[in-house]
Each structure stands twice: as structure tokens, then as C-alpha cells.
Image: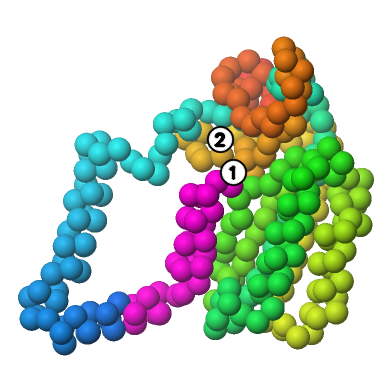
Amino acid sequence: MGIIATLSFMLDTVIKQNFNLTTWLALGACVQSILVLLLPTRVALLPAAVLLLAKIINGILISKGFTRNPSLPAPYLKRMTAPILDADGSPPEKNSDKGVVVFIVGANYNHPLGLFAPGFKPLSTYFQNMWKEAASDKEKWGFLGKADNMTMVTPGGGNALISISYWKSIEHLHRFARGPSHMVGWNWWADTQNQWPHIGIMHETYDVPAGNWENIYQNFHPIGMGQTKHKVIDRETGQVKMMSPLIEAKGGKWRSMLLRMGGEEKEEV
């Protein structure tokens, strides 16, 4: 994740997602009240009115095509797919010819302080250390990569952080689970979890055989497998490099779901 993306994610999770609508309305009301007390009424109302008007005008300009839509980058305005690349970085001759393990892990915090709840900072640090270790030696751990963290609101009004990661095999994932960073984090959780009743963790594991998975991104920011980076060896230079698996899903064996799964279906699905 780049610096800008990281800052954007932190702004979204720490600021936007960490407070509910009632809190934001109360904060806005307080700020507006202070302005009314300090300034003439017309002047105090001006910032909110100008901001609202600017938002409305900008929305109209984008919808009419006069202004570029910042949330719709040009590179994604086509059909993309993300297979597991061959060792030299080329797309596989037969689609979905490799199995993949999908590991979903999450942590939630049901506490008035949100991300600043007691215990959440060390938990977050242990998670970060695990991902760093996995990424530091992808070959050893069979780590294909992970998607950007996602946030969700739990039914009780708390928040949860969810990570989806991809591994070459269940054996690789088990090996990583017995590795140093995961064991340190797990031992900490086992020893202290009773102190943090407001914090929960979860995971789901799916061992998907070859020929039983596929993906497609059409006019969509790639997530999941589309955000992974594969370690490949350049055929011409022999150099090792990290490469995105994203390719254009343009006709042929990429045009339908069953074909992307290595099947023989000839009609569009």
C-alpha cells in the first residue's frame, strides 16, 4: 500500500469510520454554534453554505461529464482478471491451473473509544508484524499477497477491520502459523484476551483446488487477488521482480466465468 493510500485508509478508518452520524452532527453543531457566537450570523453561516453549494455544483459537473470523476481512474475502465502467473510472469496456459488458499482474518472493537480502545493498539501491531514477515519472504511462506484492509460496521455499532490474503497452499499457511511473528501474537492474545472483552478476532480459511476459482473486475478498482504481487523471474534478464497478475480479460479463454476456471464452456456466461 502506497503512502497516499495508507494515509487515505487511516483517515477513513480513524476519523470517518470511527464516529457515527450522531457524533458528526453534534461536532458540526458545536462548530457552527461557536461561529455564530464569534461572528455575525450571515458570516457564520457562509462557510457551511459555500461548502454545500460547492459539493452540489461539483456533483452536477461530474455527472454531466464536464469534470473528471476522481473515483473512476482510466486504467480500470475495462475488463481485468488476475490469474496466478507462471514462474516467468506469463499468464497460465490453462486458466486456474493452480490451487489457492484464501485466508480471511479480522478484528473488531465494540468500545466508545473505537480504534483507541484498550488493547487494540498492541493487537494491531502484532497483525502488522505478521504481514511484514509474510511479505519479507513470500517464497518461504507461499504468500501471494493480501488485499487492502476493509472496514465494516458491526450490528452493535462497533467497527471491524478485515484482511483477505492469498497463499499457495494450506501447508504454507500452516507453516506461517507456526512462525515467529504469528506465535508471538497468538501467545499475547491467549494470555491477555480476558482483559479485552470489547475486542474480538476471527478467521476463515478456504483451500480452493485448481479449476475452482476465478475473478473479474470490470470498471472496478481491483481488490482481493487483483491487489496481490507475484514473485517472477524475467525471461529476458533473469532478474527477480514483483509483478501484478492483472491482465485484460479480452476474449478467448478469459471471456466467461467457466473459461476463466479452465473449463470448456463456449458460450458467454
Asked whether residue 269 appears in the rendered view, the answer is no
- Check disc 2 and give the amino acid type: Tyr
Q: For residue 202, which quarter of the picture?
A: bottom right
Considering only vertical position in the picture, is 75 above or below 196? above
Where residue 195 appears, as percent x and y from the top left, is: 75, 86
Of mark 1 and mark 2, the one earlier in the sequence is 2
Q: How far apart are marks 1 and 2 (CA)?
A: 8 Å
Checking the image for residue 223, the label placed there is: 1
Q: Residue at x 57, y 23 (%)?
A: 248
Q: In this orientation, which residue lies closer to the viewer: 222 or 46?
A: 46
Q: Residue at x 49, y 56 (%)?
A: 7
Where residue 76 appears, as percent x and y from the top left, is: 48, 33
Q: Does the magenta stretch include residue 184?
A: no
Where residue 5 appears, as percent x and y from the top left, is: 51, 50
Q: Residue at x 69, y 78 (%)?
A: 119
Name the residue carrying label 2: 217
Helix, strand or loop at label 2? It is strand
- Check disc 1 and give the amino acid type: Ile
Asked if residue 125 lies left or right of residue 148, the reply is: right
Residue furthest to the top in view is 236
Considering only vertical position in the picture, is 56 above or below 40? above
Q: For residue 105, which quarter of the picture?
A: bottom right
Q: In which quarter of the image is the C terminus?
A: top right
Answer whether labels 1 and 2 touch (C-beta < 8 Å): yes
Q: What stretch is highlighted in magenta?
A: 1-27
Picture colour scheme: rainbow
Considering only vertical position in the picture, is 238 above or below 157? above
Q: In this orientation, which residue lies closer to the viewer: 206 or 187?
A: 187
